[in-house]
Amino acid sequence: MRFLKIKTVPTLFWSAPEPLTFRPPLVSVALLVIGLVIFGLGEALLIASGAGVSPWTVFAQGVSLHTGWSIGFATFVISALVLLPWIPLRQKPGMGTILNIIIISVVLDVALPFLPRFDSLGLRLAEAAAGVVVTGIGGGIYLIANLGPGPRDGLMTGLQRVTGFPIAHVRGAIEVSVVIIGWLLGGVVGAGTLLFAFGIGPCVAASMSFLQLCFGSRAKD
């Protein structure tokens, strides 16, 4: 369980030198896109399972109930607001910050019609669990590309750097906090939501730790 203690995003062969660059290495862009596609597929599996949406979607549901906004617009506003803490956290946006929003949205629309939907509760929970694992794998790949995290992942890495706590703990704390706020606002929480809230941090950390073990690293955790 050493991966639960990882405190830095590894620097591997596809890591760009700087998040904010106008001429990123082609391999960095390629792995960024692959990671985001996998991430989006994991989110799609969670939605298709019908066992509960991700914590941030619960939050968006709660906000939409109180504002009259659509869930999509509520998600957009929340994403924009999450970027504000980046300023004191000194987080750097990049290509990945923009592509995160675009690619994941496209993958959701493309993948959802083709994913299985089960009646059995056991199979639905298994699909939700698979979604969490797949999302974690994609998150590890695209974060290592170092071309700028998405709004929520940037909040995670920024808070990790400031607090010094392991990535798994920081991500877990963020997701659980968002679930609680969303639920208090009226968002719907399901078993898949809890699986994501408690599982995404360890899955992202395990993904990065595994990739670091396989490909070597210039960074120390």
Image (tube, rainbow, N blue to C red):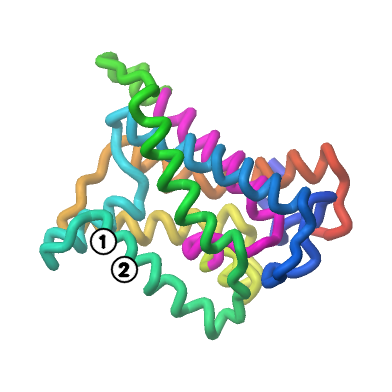
Residue farthest to the bottom, as pictured: 88
Query: Which residue position is annotated with label 1?
Result: 73
Task: State which region is magenta.
Answer: 127-154
Instruction: Please state if 103 lies on the left or on the right of 19 as rendered.
Output: left
Q: Who's the residue at 59% across and 42% down the image?
A: 138
Instruction: Please state if 151 lies on the left or on the right of 22 as rendered.
Output: left
Asked whether 164 or 32 is in front, the reply is: 32
Q: Amino acid at mark 1?
A: Phe
Q: Is residue 92 above or below residue 63?
A: below
Q: At which x and y percent is residue 114?
A: 38, 22
Q: At which x and y percent is residue 187?
A: 20, 52
Q: Secondary structure at mark 1?
A: helix
Distance from the alpha carbon under mark 1 to that under mark 2: 6 Å
Cβ–Cβ under 8 Å for marks 1 and 2 = yes
Asked whether 93 or 128 is in front, the reply is: 93
Q: Quadrant of residue 31?
A: top right
Q: Amino acid at mark 2?
A: Val
Can residue 185 be seen in this snapshot?
A: no
Q: Who's the residue at 65% across and 71% down the image?
A: 161
Instruction: Please state if 34 lies on the left or on the right of 109 as rendered.
Output: right
Q: Assess whether residue 64 is covered by the magenta stretch.
A: no
Q: Which mark is residue 77?
A: 2
Residue farthest to the top, as pictured: 120
Q: Is residue 43 above or below residue 63?
A: above
Quadrant of the frame with the N terminus: top right
Q: Is residue 183 above or below residue 94?
A: above
